[in-house]
Image (cartoon, helix red, strand yellow):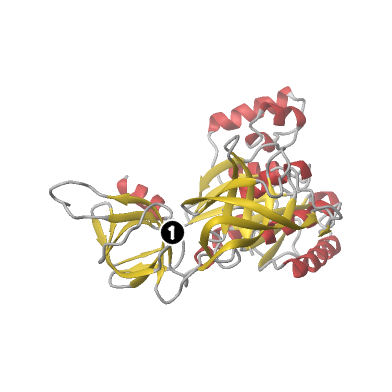
Amino acid sequence: MSGKANGYLDMELLRFTTAGSVDDGKSTLIGRLLYDSKAIFEDQMEAIENASVNKGEEQVNLALLTDGLRAEREQGITIDVAYRYFATPNRKFIIADTPGHVQYTRNMVTGASTANAALILIDARNGVIEQTRRHAYIASLLQIPHVVVCINKMDLVDFDQETYQKIKNDFKSVAEKLDIKNFYFIPMSARDGDNVVDPSKRCPWYTGKTLLQTLETLPVGEDLNREDARFPVQYVIRPQSDEFHDYRGFAGRVASGEFYVGQEVKVFPGEQTSKVKSINILDEQLEKAIAPQSVSIQLEDEIDISRGSLLSAADNCPKSDQVIDAMICWMSETPMRVRGKYTIKHTSSDVLGMVQEVVNKIDINTLEIADDTAVGLNDIARIKLKTSKPLFYDSYKKNRITGSFIIIDDATNNTVGAGMII
């Protein structure tokens, strides 16, 4: 049993998000993926079979597997971000099923922020529409490394190859303008299971991978930044015990790159240099730690380091500034206050900040610059942020961890914005 458990723990994890317009079949697709890969229990299947009968539906509605809220089931739409976990013999998966409505843009940003891949669903009857462009824009804004375009409901256009090719060409022209790195196209029917887990016999002209094969073989390891060694300190470990009388370690997660014993590092703020004395996971000593491992690092010199400090390789340092240029998604019903003060949470540090100006706002339906600069719920804008202390950061494009931050309203303690440093 322990061998099996270790095998599961050591398996590579892929996080992916789903995006698509209402009724494009996102929840049905996830239900089909879970059902055909045998990742649901008999009692779950029985429950959705009964629910489908009660709703008077002709066949089992697999969307009910993910639309867990009562309001979602009643309306037949996804409202909240639903996370689902499953595994195949090759890989573990976390799915973020996000809503398609424009008024739930913040939910999509939340679900996609940690994703390695985005599944963008397109209804084969409608082709690339306004919402498709919006979802592609958010995927590019969040620098999601892989975009899988699921051209769904192909059964309703008789698996016509020309229809598939036209949608493929239309999406490519959108992707070229948006800096989407890797994209893949799959014709499918989520309702019937064509090309989801098993290859379809109804479109012999498609010889590519099924959706599950694609998800199992996406190169996840390449998504991490291996070059820039960054370690935000979360906690200082002082055991105060006889065995570890003088031990002073710094606990945190390696955000990117690698750290090794003997490496010369620089500490921010302060910019003092030292060398790595030891690296530990619990009572195990390591020669090196790589992203995204959580470890404790001990340095050779006594340096004032606390939560919010950042270690980097001495010859490869982050940028440092108090005026930050960033894209943000606003997540609060209370509009953004220009010159208003907020708390900025960046890696493990909290600093006071002020929105200096709104440079511009994006109309997320047309992807053009909007006429006004008032930023409200679900808006995406470019802003200048002034912080009370310097942030030590990389651009979001280079490093999704040190390049991102959240904005907190001190009055309510609510997260009101998510930001990506340009």
- Locate residue 258, reporting x and y percent: 40, 68
Q: Nearer the viewer, residue 296 or 359?
A: 359
On the question of residue 201 being in view, the answer is: no
- Locate residue 268, reporting x and y percent: 42, 63
Residue drawn at (53%, 35%) of the image? 41
Q: What count of labels does the image hold?
A: 1
View extreme (bottom): residue? 315
Q: Is residue 344 above or below residue 171?
A: above
- Locate residue 396, reporting x and y percent: 59, 63
Q: Is residue 146 above or below residue 114?
A: below
Q: Nearer the viewer, residue 261 or 383?
A: 383
Q: Is residue 118 above or below residue 412?
A: below
On the question of residue 305 being in view, the answer is: yes
Q: Amino acid at mark 1?
A: Pro
User: What element does badge 1 sit on?
Assistant: loop
View extreme (left): residue? 242
Q: Residues within 10 Å of mark 1 (few under 14, many from 20)?
A: some
- Locate residue 225, reporting x and y percent: 50, 67
Quadrant of the drawing holding the C terminus:
bottom right
Q: Is residue 339 left or right of residue 294?
A: right
Q: Nearer the viewer, residue 372 or 126?
A: 372
Residue drawn at (82%, 59%) of the image? 369
Name the residue carrying label 1: 292
Residue drawn at (84%, 49%) of the image? 156
